[in-house]
Amino acid sequence: MDYLVVALILLGVLVLGTIGLMVPRLRRRPAPPEPAQTRPPVVVEEPPPTEVAPPTDVVVPPVEIEPEVEVAPPTEVEVPAPVLETPEPTAGRLIRLRTRLSRSQNVFGKGLLSLLSRDRLDEDVWEEIEDSLITADVGIDATREIVDRLRERTRVLGTRTATELRALLAAELVNALDPTLDRSLRTAPREGAPAVLLVVGVNGAGKTTTCGKVARVLIADGRSVVLGAADTFRAAAADQLATWASRVGAEVVRGPEAADPASVAFDAVRRGIDLGVDTVLIDTAGRLQNKIGLMDELGKVKRVVEKHGPVDETLLVLDATTGQNGLEQARVFTEVVDVTGVVLTKLDGTAKGGIVIAVQRKLGIPVKLVGLGEGPDDLAPFEPTQFVDALLGTEPLGSDA
């Protein structure tokens, strides 16, 4: 009986414990969601329809049509032709430019005449005269010949006045320049073909500028000219030549940069034949006389040009300020292209005007033109008597200019 009671008590305790464990879990369950509150429908009251008035006739104002305006056709703008310059005549140009030789006059005019006018012409004086001439780049051989002749003539004639001594000195200098040499430019056309002038020289001698000035000399003497820009190595050379040509109405034949110079020269002569001009002037690239390849190329230019006919003149441009170095330049160029005449530039900027004598004495090539300044007409035909008179700085004797 007692066991039964104990079992009942344990069963009761077990039942109560189980109920106690389950009650908290039931309390922690989430409450079911509340049913959503339904809102009453919103009633939108539409405004009563408005009465639309019947359409009335719309009066559109008349559009005024403007009368058609006649538009004149575009007129061509006339570009004024460039004003052509009239080069100065070459006759007497050297006399007009005589003051440009002032530096050389200090040696020839003032220096030599003052030595010769001394009361006594002893050995020391004659040595000073020799030194002055050599300093002026006359050359040793030419100087000795001039001084020997002066000494003999002053001894025989017994001259002492300044006028007589000047006349003797002038005569000896003119004689050293060999006035018998032909200094004329062969620029006249032959058998229906233009005369061809080839201009050559070293770099920096002022060759392209001189080429433009030679064209002015020819045009001043009544020749019609075509210029060939065969200096294709220097980009600005053709433009520079074209500027010179435009001033006097000449035509320039040019090729692309780095083109074959011989081809450009050939085309220039052919263009001159087609136009029937008097002279074709070809500017070539400057080159050093010791560069064999460049000198051979210059020979090629001449050979190609001669397919049209012979070259009438080959002018070598020499810088007077280079002095005796110009002699070696002239010698090499002569061997390659047979130089027929020398253009001596920058003669106004040097006291060594005697280079004219040295070039002719050493090479037998006549100086045909001299440059005496930077102006467009500062290139003059060379005439020995006028040149010596200008160097001596006195009024010309026996000159018609």
Image (spheres, rainbow, N blue to C red):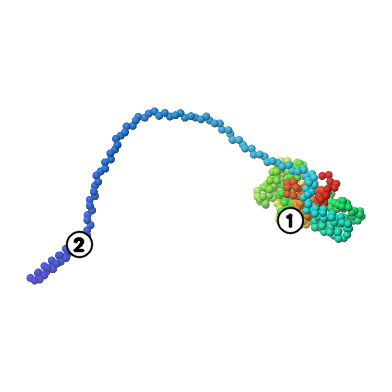
Instruction: Return the residue found at the far left.
Output: 1
In the depicted structure, whether residue 46 falls above or below residue 383: above
Q: Position of residue 385 (x, y in %)?
A: 83, 49
Label 1, label 2: how far apart the Cα atoms are: 123 Å
Q: Position of residue 216 (x, y in %)?
A: 74, 45
In the depicted structure, whether residue 245 falls above or below residue 128: above
Quadrant position of residue 191: top right
According to the picture, the residue beneath numbered tag 2 turns out to be 24
In the depicted structure, whether residue 181 falls above or below residue 52: below
Tag 1: amino acid: Gln
Q: Residue at x 9, y 69 (%)?
A: 5
Residue neighbourhood size for the residue with mark 1, other residues' Cα within 10 Å, grouped as few (<14), some (14–19), many (≥20): some
Can you tell which mark lies on residue 94?
Answer: none
Quadrant of the image containing the C terminus: top right
Determine the secondary structure under disc 2.
helix
Using the image as rendered, state which of residue 160 and residue 219 is in the foreground. 160
179 sits left or right of 244 in the view: right
Q: Position of residue 368 (x, y in %)?
A: 79, 49
Tag 2: amino acid: Pro
Count of numbered circles in the view: 2
Using the image as rendered, state which of residue 73 and residue 284 is in the foreground. 73
| Residue 339 visible in the snapshot | no
Q: Are the residues at dot 1 and dot 2 in contact (C-beta closer than 8 Å)?
A: no
According to the picture, the residue beneath numbered tag 1 turns out to be 289
Quadrant of the image containing the N terminus: bottom left
| Residue 204 visible in the snapshot | yes
Mark 1 or mark 2: which comes first in sequence?
2
Q: Residue at x 23, y 48 (%)?
A: 37
